[in-house]
Image: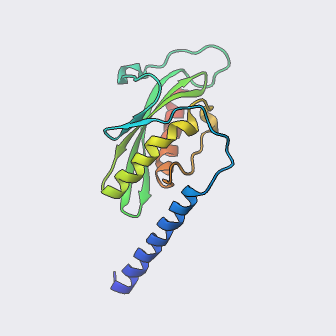
Amino acid sequence: MTTPLRKSLYVGFAGLSIIGTAAACAPTTEAPTTQTPATQDGGQAATGTPTSAASSTAIASTGGSTYKDGTYSSDGTYTSPNGQETVGVELTLAADKVSAVNITVHPSNPNTKKFQGEFASGIAAQIVGKDIDDLNVSKVAGSSLTSGGFNEAVEQIKSKAK
């Protein structure tokens, strides 16, 4: 790329970053939730009781549930200014509702690590207790691109849980 074009792209990305940061700081009209946000530990955030990969075996649910209860995981991808990125998502379902979430960050650079970490620390407050069919995350804690990978992983999890 030519230098003027490269500078224009950097200025554009910087402007988008500032706009995104300002939007994340704007007050919301949502009522505060009683959910405790996930804690970040080694690039992972978890809520609820920790589960092992062995617990991903679905337990048959009763009632009119569409999805089998259990813990499911999948990776979602999205495109950032630095290229293709991946985020790991683990959801625990009970009666079609999310009872716990665990995010595994897969950063390729420091910026991605920062945004995926912020996403991981804020996602539980937005989705725990909600029906899996109602999940469509757009921005969490200032991270809007990571949500694309999260939503992709949720769709894969829904397929696994049927």
- Above or below 149: residue 53: above
From this view, report whether residue 102 is shown above or below residue 95: below
Image quadrant assignment for residue 73: top left
Q: Tell me: residue 3, above or below residue 89.
A: below
Q: Reply above or below: 150 against 45.
A: below
Looking at the picture, tell me which residue is in the foreground, 67 or 71: 71
Q: In the rendered view of the protein, which quadrant contains the C terminus?
A: top right
**With 151 as the anchor, is 134 left or right in this view?**
right
**Residue at 60% across, 29% down:** 129
Q: Is residue 27 left or right of residue 69?
A: right
In the image, what residue occupies the spot 54% across and 33% down?
Answer: 158
| Residue at 61% over, 21% down | 95
Place of residue 2 in the rendered image (x, y in percent of width and height, measured from the top left): 34, 84
Q: Is residue 53 left or right of residue 119?
A: left
Residue 122 x/y as whole percent: 49, 42
Q: Position of residue 132 (x, y in %)?
A: 59, 33
Q: Residue at x 43, y 80 (%)?
A: 8
Tell me where residue 29 appears, x and y as whole percent: 69, 48
Q: How many marks?
A: 0
Q: Where, quadrant-wise, is the N terminus in this rendering?
A: bottom left
